[in-house]
């Protein structure tokens, strides 16, 4: 059974204080690993898809990396508007298109 | 691009009534759509997978007679909560995957529907 574990559960940063969020996964035949951002009371917003170990993707202050066992979401010089819950999800090669989500990391960036 | 809408955004209903939620992919076609449920401070739980022109596939523990799903076109799926009860109150979110491409299909999510059953 696919499993996704995210840490930390919550993270508080000062504006400009860089950090990383972790997503550890167990999956039979990774088809894709996805990062989403979710604001309170809204649906998840797509950030990145990673397909294979060693892959990296960047968008503004965010950079996602992937190894065979985990993914990191690096946040460089965060701003208060980066405050949100960040969700990681995996898609395996047998459960067609289904996503298994982690419980998320709640990020709060203070000015 | 890849915009998904949901309607209504919020609904309050009396116990025993039925509620229909629409999910539309606005700028792409989606052979497959998904319905999730999210409780406060919890992650998304997949309820069912909806395929255009065929019956939905429900996850274990989800009552298919209570949560009716119809995927009548490549841009529209509906979820009907029948005979709603207070325990059905939740945040319902749909997602859609573009029909083109087969590797690691990305799901794009709607804004969600907040259901409150009194």
Image (tube, helix red, strand yellow):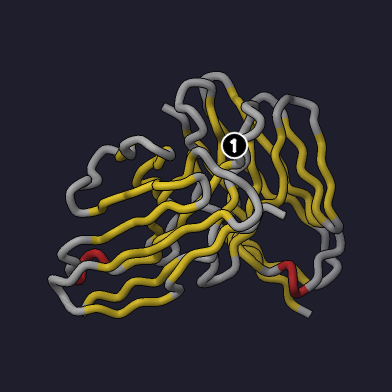
- Please state which of residues A109 and B43 is positioned toward the viewer in this rendering: B43
SS class, disc 1: loop
Quadrant into which the N terminus of chain B falls? bottom right
* Residue A30: quadrant of the picture: top right
Q: Is residue B64 left or right of residue B43?
A: left
Q: Is B106 above or below relative to B23? A: above
Q: Is residue B68 left or right of residue A34?
A: left
For disc 1, the neighbor class at 10 Å (few under 14, some 14 to 19, many from 20) is few
* Residue A60: quadrant of the picture: bottom right
Quadrant into which the C terminus of chain B falls? bottom left
- Please state which of residues B65 and A11 is positioned toward the viewer in this rendering: B65
Q: Is B102 above or below relative to B117? A: above
* Circle 1 chain: B
* Residue A90: quadrant of the picture: top right
Residue under label 1, please give it: B99
Residue at 42% x, 52% y is B77
Q: Is residue B41 left or right of residue A111?
A: left
Residue A52, position as x, y percentages in the image: 72, 25
Residue A73, position as x, y percentages in the image: 73, 47
Residue B105, position as x, y percentages in the image: 61, 35
Residue B37, position as x, y percentages in the image: 38, 56
Q: How many marks?
A: 1
- Residue A93 in view of the camera: yes
Residue at 25% x, 46% y is B62
- Please state which of residues B68 and A36 is positioned toward the viewer in this rendering: B68
Q: Is A20 above or below relative to A23? A: below
- Please state which of residues A36 and B67 is positioned toward the viewer in this rendering: B67
Residue at 21% x, 67% y is B18
Q: Is residue A12 left or right of residue B24?
A: right
- Residue A45 in view of the camera: no
């Amino acid at each position: 059974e696919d499993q996704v574990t995210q840490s930390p559960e919550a993270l508080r940063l000062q504006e400009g204080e860089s950090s990383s969020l972790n997503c550890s996964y167990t999956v039979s035949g990774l088809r894709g690993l996805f990062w989403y951002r979710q604001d309170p009371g809204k649906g998840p917003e797509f950030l990145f898809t990673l397909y294979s170990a060693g892959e990296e993707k960047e968008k503004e202050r965010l950079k996602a990396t992937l190894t065979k066992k985990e993914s990191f979401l690096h946040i460089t010089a965060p701003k208060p508007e980066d405050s949100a819950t960040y969700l990681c999800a995996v898609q395996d090669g047998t459960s067609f298109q289904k996503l298994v989500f982690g419980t998320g990391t709640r990020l709060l960036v203070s000015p | 691009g890849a915009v998904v809408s949901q309607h209504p955004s919020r609904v309050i209903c009396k116990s025993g009534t039925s509620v229909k939620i629409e999910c539309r992919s606005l700028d792409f076609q989606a052979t497959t759509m998904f319905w999730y449920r999210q409780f406060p401070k919890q992650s998304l739980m997949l309820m069912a997978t909806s395929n255009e022109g065929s019956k939905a596939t429900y996850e274990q523990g989800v009552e298919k007679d209570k949560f009716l799903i119809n995927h009548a076109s490549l841009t529209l799926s509906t979820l009907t909560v029948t005979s709603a009860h207070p325990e059905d109150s939740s945040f319902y979110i749909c997602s859609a995957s573009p029909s083109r491409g087969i590797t690691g299909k990305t799901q794009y999510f709607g804004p969600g529907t907040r259901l409150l059953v009194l």
